[in-house]
Amino acid sequence: MTALDGVFRREWGPAVAALARWSGDLSVAEDAVQEACAQALRVWQAEGVPANPGAWLTTVARNRALDRLRRESARPGKELAAVYEQVNTSDTAPELHPVRDDELRMMFTCAHPALDRSSQLALTLRLISGLTVPEIARALLQSDSAIGQRITRAKNKIRKANIPLRVPPPELLGERTPHVLGCIYSVFTEGYWSTGGPSAIRDELCDEGVRLARELCALMPGNRDAHALAALVLLHDSRRRTRVDEGGALIPLDEQDRSQWDRGRIARGLEHLRSAEGALGSYLPQAVIAALHATAPSWQHTDWATICVAYDRLVAMTDSPVAAASRALAVGFRDGFAAGLAALDAVADDPRLARTNTVAPIRADLLRRAGRFDEAQRWYRVALDGSGSEPAAAFLRRRLAECVTS
């Protein structure tokens, strides 16, 4: 079953995308592919996995969808009747269309600006990544019912607003692509920086974020921002297995075993970074920062001057107080921790930071490194009050204990 589960996850997104393009209905596509997977589970365990499992699933799903549409079209007043009429007169089977084009359509549909960010993310994880509703609920720290309702509302909105399942025309491509990039990055960050729950890392979301970012580069090879995003997630992901110890406790960057970093991912990330040269979006300076960390021979030899320059560009581009607060930590390593605290003071009162737990842990870290342990203790306690995930809280408690003993 484990081997088949991997096949289903790999083929789910392309199959749903192909059926959605063919039928024009996301629910019909998703239900048909789900039924095809159930049939495959019975057939493949007895007869073995076919040479082209994706084509098998898509063909079976198409037949299932056609049967459903035929039944629905016979019922008076059913809105699927028009859909059946459309697909019944088409001779083009979905498996004949390039899969990559279909997946790109689905990415743009899931990340449509008419949907809120949470709905974009849930829909992407369901329709493209193939995660189940309970898996998505665990990943997003919501109830199964809340996620199910969110996905249903998003699909209904797409259908009722007649949002086309296609890549937008050239004049709209520029304004839509950032939504796709942001949605993919959200998938990755939900896995890499868990904001709540018992685990610091969710591997399946990290893997899917990396896959989607690289797939988007293949779909849009000339898009520099897509390459910048791929570089960013690959360079971060190269450190994934060193970010926690065997017990699941967080390991900060300066304590990680660099010999265990994934050099292949670093090399591929740097390739995407070179392709991203000239990108105008915020992913490029973030990728530069990640690259400088990934290529530094040691923590002591980190190029903090260039990292600060990249942060300067990021803050200028985004006006993000979170980025400005993170920049303060880099300033502390470049110019001294007193300078870092002064840089943090300059942004700490930004009201947008009140909704985050950003300032307290950075201030506590700078104070600890400056040897001001009594003050650091107070700020670690403030940071603990706003901590989400248990691993993050455990790390803060560890630092607090170090300050107490010091």
Image: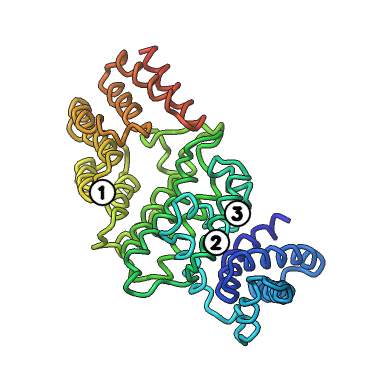
- Closest to the observer: 232 or 32? 32
- Closest to the observer: 164 or 371? 164
> Amino acid type of disc 1?
Thr
Q: Is residue 29 left or right of residue 45?
A: left
Give yes or no for contact between labels 1 and 3 (Cβ–Cβ under 8 Å): no
Q: Is residue 51 visible?
A: no
Q: Report the residue marked by disc 3.
A: 131
Q: Residue at x 67, y 64 (%)?
A: 31
Q: Would you identify the image quadrant in which residue 338 lies?
A: top left
Q: Report the residue marked by disc 1.
A: 318
At which x and y percent is residue 395?
A: 45, 27
Q: Residue at x 74, y 74 (%)?
A: 71
On-image quarter of the N terminus: bottom right
Q: Report the residue marked by disc 2.
A: 128
Q: CA distance from mark 2 to mark 3?
A: 8 Å
In terms of sequence position, does the residue under pointer 2 or pointer 1 come before the other?
Answer: 2
On-image quarter of the C terminus: top left
> Amino acid type of disc 2?
Ile
Tag 3's secondary structure?
loop
